[in-house]
């Protein structure tokens, strides 16, 4: 198994042994950082280990600490270095070599590999190593077989629809439809028809009967995304349907039974929306029989590192490139970035980076890629690239075109402001 991307922290008080273990770990293919028995708590700001090789004294210090370092709860494998003294940890052995180290730490999965979910825990494509998100998936497992309404909260891009799909796939409705509707993407006057459908002739353009999302979901799951943006005037109608489990198509008279389970999601603070009188408290309580909150990516450093590796490997395969990695300096920037777009932002940023950069390791700064602060020419180029990706252009052709476009945009003499000259900037 290739161990080349698993970060390993070696904590050893004796300098000679520390350097020996480092050489062995590097020969075994690990990404290595070393620390003495006094400075190991400082790691985590720029390096997030998934495996740790400890001397026994450091292990006892960690176990007895009331404030362990931030990385301690996310380490996958802990091993004791060969030393005198007792330890409850698995031990490397008195005469370690690279092969024995690789075998001893072989339980840690590769950075870019997706481990199988624990048996009985649906994921719906929601990938995580974060302890809180793993607990969330356990809640998903418990709720999947229940018909109760669930409200999923979290910032944009955290994966709320993936969690909704996990609820659907983990229960008895998995073979029935999963119907998703974005309440913020449809004009208010059309939402009622999208929810409940309409009869032919109900309004000017109603040339035939239309089945709404409640009807299309059948005995499956209806996912109401961005429910916090639902217009106030439609909220009592939705509440009535959730309470009575019946609705009437627009322009119709016959009641239709609701058989689907309803799951809602929002990035809004609904209690605050209730205080602002733009969201009904009775609808909130009807939707939030159970609630699931997805933490933002900036609170999940282990997921940030792991998902980055997964996306780099996946996109390199798509673009027919050799695998590449992120530099240590870039990783420090990644950890200090807020990631307002969360996993969606990370995915798009890494995809674009592989298209236009040849470096290995990659020197990246996610702060320079914010759409709101990027110059207009970068935004236009980005929009073009993303459109071409969706159209299925050959990867090699698109990558070369993007590189040429970037090169020709810059002043060939290396202007001090490092940007292209807009026509409006030229002097008459």
Image (cartoon, helix red, strand yellow):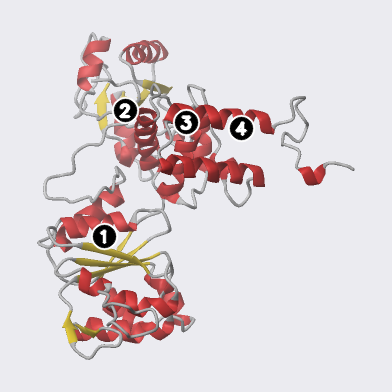
First in sequence: mark 2 vs mark 3: 2
- Residue behind mark 1: 164
Q: CA distance from mark 1 to mark 3?
A: 30 Å
As measured in the structure, the alpha-carbon distance from the residue carrying label 3 to the one carrying label 4 is 15 Å
Residue under pointer 2: 52
| Disc 1 element | helix
Which quarter of the figure is the N terminus placed in? top left
Residue receiving disc 3: 354
The mark that comes first in sequence, 1 or 3, is: 1
Q: Which mark is residue 405?
A: 4
* Local crowd size for mark 3, using a 10 Å CA cut-off: few (<14), some (14–19), many (≥20): some
At numbered mark 3, what does the secondary structure look like: helix, strand or loop?
helix
Q: Secondary structure at mark 4?
A: helix
Q: Residue at x 42, y 14 (%)?
A: 15
Q: CA distance from mark 1 to mark 2?
A: 35 Å
47, 388: nearer the viewer: 388
């Amino acid at each position: 198994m290739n161990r080349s991307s698993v970060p390993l922290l070696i904590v050893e008080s004796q300098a000679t042994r520390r350097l020996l273990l480092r050489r062995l770990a590097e020969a075994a293919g690990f990404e290595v950082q070393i620390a003495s028995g006094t400075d190991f708590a400082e790691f985590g700001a720029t390096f997030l280990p998934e495996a740790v090789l400890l001397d026994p004294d450091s292990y006892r210090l960690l176990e007895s600490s009331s404030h362990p370092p931030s990385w301690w709860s996310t380490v996958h494998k802990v091993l004791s270095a060969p030393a005198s003294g007792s330890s409850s940890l698995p031990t490397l052995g008195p005469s370690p070599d690279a092969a024995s180290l690789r075998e001893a730490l072989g339980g840690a999965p590769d950075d870019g590999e997706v481990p199988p979910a624990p048996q009985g825990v649906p994921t719906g494509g929601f990938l995580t190593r974060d302890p809180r998100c793993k607990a969330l998936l356990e809640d998903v497992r418990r709720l999947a077989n229940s018909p109760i309404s669930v409200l999923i909260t979290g910032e944009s891009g955290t994966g709320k629809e993936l969690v909704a799909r996990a609820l659907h796939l983990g229960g008895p409705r998995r073979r029935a439809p999963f119907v998703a509707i974005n309440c913020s993407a449809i004009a208010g006057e059309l939402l009622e028809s999208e929810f409940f459908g309409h009869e032919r002739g109900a309004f000017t353009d109603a040339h035939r009967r239309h089945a709404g999302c409640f009807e299309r979901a059948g005995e499956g799951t209806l996912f109401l995304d961005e429910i916090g943006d639902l217009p106030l005037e439609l909220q009592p109608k939705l509440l009535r349907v959730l309470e009575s489990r019946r609705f009437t198509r627009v322009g119709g008279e016959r009641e239709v039974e609701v058989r689907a389970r309803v799951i809602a999601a929002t990035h809004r603070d609904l209690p605050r929306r209730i205080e602002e009188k733009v969201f009904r408290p009775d609808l909130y309580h009807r939707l939030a029989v159970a609630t699931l909150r997805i933490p933002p990516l900036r609170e999940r450093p282990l997921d940030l590192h792991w998902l980055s590796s997964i996306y780099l490997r996946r996109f390199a395969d798509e673009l027919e490139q050799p695998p590449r990695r992120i530099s240590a300096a870039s990783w420090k920037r990644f950890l200090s970035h807020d990631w307002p777009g969360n996993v969606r932002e990370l995915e798009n940023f890494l995809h674009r980076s592989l298209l236009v950069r040849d470096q290995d390791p990659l020197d990246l700064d996610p702060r320079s890629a914010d759409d709101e602060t990027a110059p207009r020419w970068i935004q236009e180029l980005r929009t073009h690239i993303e459109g071409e990706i969706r159209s299925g252009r050959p990867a090699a052709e698109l990558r070369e075109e993007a590189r040429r476009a970037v090169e020709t945009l810059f002043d060939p003499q290396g202007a001090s402001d490092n940007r292209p000259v807009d026509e409006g900037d030229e002097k008459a």
